[in-house]
Amino acid sequence: MRNKYGVVIGLEVHAQLKTDSKIFCGCSTRFGDEPNSNTCPVCLGLPGALPVLNEKVVEYATRTALALNLHVNEESVFSRKNYFYPDLPKGYQISQYKEPFSEHGWVEIMTGERDETGHPRDIQLKRFGITRMHLEEDAGKSLHDGMPDSDTRTYVDLNRSGTPLAEIVSEPDFRSSWEAYDYVQYLRRVLQYVETCDTNMEEGSLRCDANVSVRPVGREEFGTKVELKNLNSVRFLQRALEYEIDRQIGVIESGGEVVQETRLWNERENRTYTMRTKEDAHDYRYFPEPDLPPLRVEPAMIERIRAGLPELPEALRRRFAEQYALSHEDAVVLTGSRSLAGFFEATARASGNARSSANWIKNELLRELDSRKIEIDASPVSPERLAELIAELDAGRISGAQAKDLLPKMLRAMRCLRR
Ligand code: ADP
Ligand code: ZN
Ligand code: MG
């Protein structure tokens, strides 16, 4: 059944920009504080309070946009998106609509299906379009409690109200759940490299909605799309898409029609449920925000930020693969973070043996650090020390087994020395 249909997926990702203060007021964005403690008249939506745009948000947004090859518009416009919800105190969200912060971006990434063991197969370089990235404020958080047969209470915490969000909308360019998965993993990596978002999906600093449709192979037009929400990890995203693709094909094969709707992923039951159909879709009555002037970004600032961007993960992966003759999987692992990539390059330089450095870091050091819950930038064994170990091994002065035995001992010893 599956091979009679093609899949079309587009993703909407909300990334919390990790500025210290909120987008339109000076309140702290810290996570986990006493509920409603980080609030003021602006983010509580009190009448008469006026928003003022946080300059840091513009800087972080520019850095994010440039890293995704988006064109940053010199002028963009904030709009009110009107809807009613208890965690939205103003009755509208300040967002951007017609004239977004940035548009026409893309990423080029390695992607492919997975075999039964979860290993990528038929990996290839693909380009995915990014329609736009606009700025908006986050809403507060509703906390529901209560047992099925008792009163259900809902509590509202407005600490999150006014946290800056960048909404990254992709083109409908993904043709499988794994492509969508690889894209989100890559987005997370890029945002970590440019240090604009924590990308923690469980804590909600990165949130992803997926739009998916199916169509018979050979047909040009897209099928009716369904929006999936409540995807709190990349694994759930991938699984929810698989479930939804099968469900849609099942509907069509049994003579029915897919209805446009929003569905929620239920992780315990491994399925999606209808949340709302097109009939109860909101009319947001967007209009330009009268309390904020158009946002102007100076070209000089854009160029200054562009010049300060680090080498981005895909470029780095390609360079590592070529320069050090690493396998695709090794290059992906070793570019997992800027710190790890830096550690690898320093070890390769000091030891003169990139292949061995890659293997030692990937197979031994990372495992040892992981079991001790130590991050790579805090590794007690420095790249230079690890390079010495590799050099001893290369010179035949110690055996592989001895070297493997030595590494945990070095870690223990140097950890003591550091204290
Ligand atoms: P809406 O007007 O419902 O917000 P958009 O056209 O703005 O829809 O698209 C929202 C997201 O859905 C985008 O990421 C886009 O790529 C994706 N998308 C649009 N049409 C389809 C489709 N037929 N199938 C899958 N994804 C789609
Ligand atoms: Zn505030
Ligand atoms: Mg839209």
Image: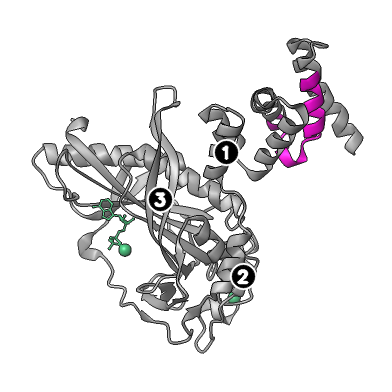
- Residue located at (82% from left, 25% from top): 388
Left/right of residue 380 with respect to residue 119 in the rendered view: right
Q: Is residue 389 magenta?
A: yes
Neighbor class of circle 2 (other Cα within 10 Å; few <14, some 14-19, many 20+) is: some
Looking at numbered disc 2 in the image, what kind of residue is underneath it? Answer: Lys
Is residue 177 placed above or below 131 in the rendered structure?
A: above
Q: Which of the numbered marks, if any, corresponds to residue 319? A: 1
**Label 1: few (<14), some (14–19) or many (≥20) C-alpha neighbours in 10 Å:** some
Q: Quadrant of the N terminus?
A: top left
Label 2 sits on residue: 56
Label 2's element?
helix
Circle 1: residue type? Arg
Which one is earlier in the sequence, the residue at label 1 or at label 3?
A: 3
Residue at the outermost bottom position: 48
**CB within 8 Å, label 2 to label 1:** no
**Residue 349 lies in the magenta stretch:** no
Q: What range of the chain is rendered magenta?
A: 369-391
Q: Quadrant of residue 152?
A: bottom left
The answer to whether residue 266 is left or right of residue 329 is left
